[in-house]
Amino acid sequence: MSTLTKPLLYNGYKINDKLSVTGRIEKVFFTEVYNLSDGRFLYLFTNIKSNEVRGDNDQLIRIEASGSEYLGLITDSYSQEQVTKIIDSLTELKGFDAVAGMRELKQVLVEDVINPLQNPEKYEKFKLSIPNGVILFGPPGCGKTYIIRKLAEEINYNFVEIKHSDIASSYIHGTVGKVGRLFDAARSKAPSIVFIDEIEGIVPKRDSLGESSQHKQEEINEFLMQLNDAAKDKILVVAATNRPQLIDPALLRAGRMDKRIFVGPPDETARQELFKLFLSDRPTSEIDYAKLASLTANYVSADIEYMATEAAREAVARDLDTVDQSTIENVISVTQPSISEEELAMYEDFRKLQRW
Ligand SMILES: Nc1ncnc2c1ncn2[C@@H]1O[C@H](COP(=O)(O)OP(=O)(O)OP(=O)(O)O)[C@@H](O)[C@H]1O
Ligand SMILES: [Mg+2]
């Protein structure tokens, strides 16, 4: 990390004090924060160059100091949270570039979802339907939410997300209105992807509904109606669940969510790519990615992300210059996979529900 030795001037504003030095440990990304004589604040990103920035931020400025160029940003307020947000926006990969592995899934999404959405006339001419919805199922932490967020970036759609537990309401009819309002919001921002997590809560099997199921039935009907109309309003509905056995089969009928995609734990190649991705913006010495992948059968994507972060944290704690092989292997040896083998076997059984 470099420190500025001489006081620096920006557009005539003098820097008063250095307020803090923030090490964003997870990303080994350092930010110095200064207050300026006009009451505003300068964030100085000391170890990222302008050509390394991935995200867009038109407020960024270049600052020459001590013969080097730094990136900076001037803001009216200063908070740790804001620094973190800005760093995230600058370092985040966008679209499918940010997705490790999942080759087959990306291909299905391109061929069966993106292409029809973007060339509807061609598909209609051949009497092929444009998908209203897709359902993803599989164990937690394997990237269901993540891939769809990245799909939205890839095709420049707005991303509207809800979880059943967020909208569940104890008031009669409460949820019905909320589903409608959500779709209204998505329509007004179209083209949009509406991502519905815990779909089994919104459209549960009818025989599991109790006596007082009248308003639940209305909610299901409203949801199915919204779904039937989605494509023509440029809305793609993507539902996700860890418990596909609890969904009402009416949802899976042709024309509704007739594409069902299993998102399982990463295979060996995907695990290599995940490690590469999560270590890509951190200083590393030479890493044997094939070996890391071979050591991590049964770990899900979220586990690999966690272990890469832990290894970086460990490197900082031990004052190493880089994250090295043995540090990562140590972290792997003390980290349990988040999903047990029995649970994985149960999820594996769901694979046969897949259809596209
Ligand atoms: N293919 C991938 N490439 C890069 N990162 C990934 C990938 N898959 C998952 N991740 C990472 O793993 C984390 C967990 O994934 P995500 O939250 O999408 O899982 P999920 O399947 O939606 O889980 P849940 O069922 O608990 O909602 C994500 O935040 C993301 O950082
Ligand atoms: Mg999720």
Image: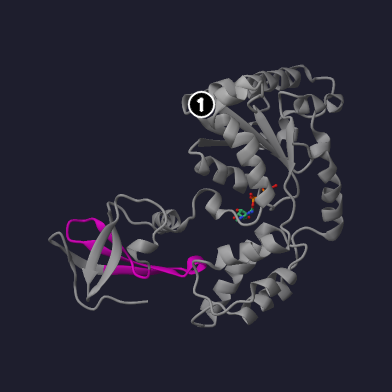
Q: Quadrant of the C terminus?
A: top right
Q: Is residue 33 magenta?
A: yes
Residue 287 vs residue 244, the one in the foreground = 287
**Residue 213 in the image, given as x and y percentages of width and height:** 79, 20
Considering depth in this image, is 99 or 251 the residue closer to the camera? 99
**Residue 115 left/right relative to 158:** right
Q: Quadrant of the N terminus?
A: bottom left
Q: Which residues are magenta?
A: 18-47
Q: Residue 176 appears in which quarter of the rendering? A: top right
Q: Residue at x 57, y 25 (%)?
A: 122
Magenta stretch encompasses residue 117: no
The residue depicted at 47 percent of the width and 28 percent of the height is: 189
Which residue is at 67% across, 74% downward? Answer: 331
The residue identified by callout 1 is 185
Q: Above or below — where is 355 with respect to 103?
A: above
**Coloration mode:** one colour
Q: How many numbered circles are shown? A: 1
Q: Position of residue 96 (x, y in %)?
A: 55, 49
Position of residue 333 in the picture relative to residue 29 (left or right): right
The image position of residue 93, as x and y in percent, is: 49, 55
- Main SS of the magenta part reads strand
Q: Is residue 201 above or below residue 71?
A: above
